[in-house]
Amino acid sequence: MKYQPPRGTRDIFGDDVCRFGRIVSIFRDVVARYCFEEIKTPIFEDTSLFERTIGKETDIVKKQMYNFEDKSGRPLTLRPEGTAPVVRAAISNNLLEKLPAKFFYIGEMFRYERPQKDRKRQFYQAGAEIFGEKSASADLEAIKICREIFDKLELKFSLEINTIGCQKCRPAYEKALKDFISGRLDGLCSDCRERYETNPLRVLDCKKESCRQILSSAPAIDDYLCPECRRNFSDIKSALSESRINFTRNEKLVRGLDYYNGCVFEFYVSGARDAVAAGGRYDGLVEFLGGRPVPACGFAIGIDRVMPLVSPVGKTDKYIVISAGTEKREAEKIAERIRAAGKPAFVAGKKLSAALKFASSRGFKYAVIAGEEELRENSVSVRNLSEGRQEKFSKEDFFNSL
RNA sequence: GUGAGUGUAGCUCAGCCCGGUUAGAGCACCAGGUUGUGGCCCUGGGGGCCGGGGGUUCAAAUCCCCUCACUCACCCCA
């Protein structure tokens, strides 16, 4: 039996690797223009970093983490998400002295789950985090960056936003919600009955129709927000309108990770199975991990989910230099000149018909034929493979035209 | 973790229900037709433990059991 990549992983090559590269370069370009700086964090961290920040009751921590011990028994985990490591790194390296501070990352994440369409066990995220900005401008910036990226990728997105309150006001809402649910537990699914105990907000986004029915008359968070959260959320909404970013309010949108508070958002693109980007505020996280109290917000884009929707980058025109049976050295010299002019060149020594066949099947734009006849005349024949036209130039004319 | 489907040539699949010569097709690949012109056409060729193991049978790609893998959905998430 031949080796296959391990379950939930895949090899990325050909057009897919072009798509991947295009997404990453657009992401880098946009984020750099907002003055974010790249940060690379380890691929694994102390297990407790994730357990404490993501939340013990989440599926990620309960059953999706790649946990292992190193040889000295340290409990470690392959990172299942990017935010906690960035926050940890910012604290470890004292990067939050001068605020605001902005970081971005691109990398692979690991979650042990059943693989399916565009959901792998090793997947890639590109994310950005803003530290030290309490006002709505940070939330707006995160959303604007996503908007720009999807625009440049030529993807039509829709945006959903919500607020889930802060440490001050969420408890009151959670209590109201629990009171509401407790009388109706019998009608809810078993998952929801468990969520009621562990994380009542999550009952809101249960997909089961019977649960949704019951929850449709649940208390609304808007009635429980503290003045600050109310203000912040309305600032964001009006800023979005000013920036002409369409959004819909989704009161049932709650994020799966415990550290979120305030405004949360998700981007959808038609054709993708689920959200392609998501983010929100996590004002308490830096302090929770031992730093000073620093408000923060960020987002991550699921590269794997965007990949099938974007076209591969336009490739630059490639040249194949064919020696057609003569000494290959001459063809190699010609190729060097083409490369020196900044264009990709490949040398083929096969007989002409085979080389041309190879060239057209591999997507070369031009064949530069340097056979016996050309060698005698100090010329080259340049054939446009897509159009089938061919012209002979002196070598100097050809090099000058590059 | 739950449910359904699929594993036959490099790829897409037929054959399986109803067991019976040497397991097929298209595409791709290689060679030749074409010793300096690719795509089109023609001819020929290489390729397969029919996912793996066990069972039933005179006989298994085909029927039964187990196992592994993949796909899709649920759950959850980016």
Image: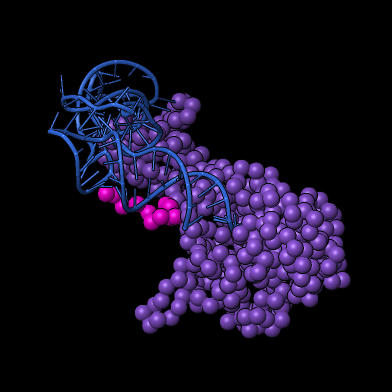
Q: Which chain is blue?
A: B
What coloring was used for the rendering? by chain
Residue at the spot 71% in from the left edge and 48% down from the top edge: A158
Palette colour of chain A: purple
Q: Nearer the viewer, residue A231 or A91?
A: A231
Q: Nearer the viewer, residue A309 or B13?
A: B13
In reply to whether residue A320 is colored magenta, the answer given is no
Residue A288 in sight here: yes
Residue A239 in sight here: no
Residue at the spot 85% in from the left edge and 64% down from the top edge: A223
The percent position of residue A189, horizontal first and vertical second, equals 63, 56
Relative vertical location of residue A342 with respect to residue A381 in this rendering, above or below? below
Residue A369 picture quarter? top left
Residue at the spot 78% in from the left edge and 59% down from the top edge: A218
Q: As drawn, is A50 to the left or to the right of A241?
A: left
Residue A139 picture quarter? bottom right
The percent position of residue A103, horizontal first and vertical second, equals 63, 69
Q: As drawn, is A111 to the left or to the right of A101?
A: left
Q: Nearer the viewer, residue B7 or B35?
A: B7
Residue at the spot 77% in from the left edge and 53% down from the top edge: A216
The image shows a total of numbered marks equal to 0
In reply to whether residue A10 is colored magenta, the answer given is yes
The percent position of residue A346, horizontal first and vertical second, equals 38, 43
**Magenta-tinted stretch:** A1-11
Main structural element of the magenta stretch: helix, strand or loop? Answer: loop
Relative vertical location of residue B67 with respect to residue A287 in this rendering, above or below? above
The percent position of residue B74, horizontal first and vertical second, equals 57, 50
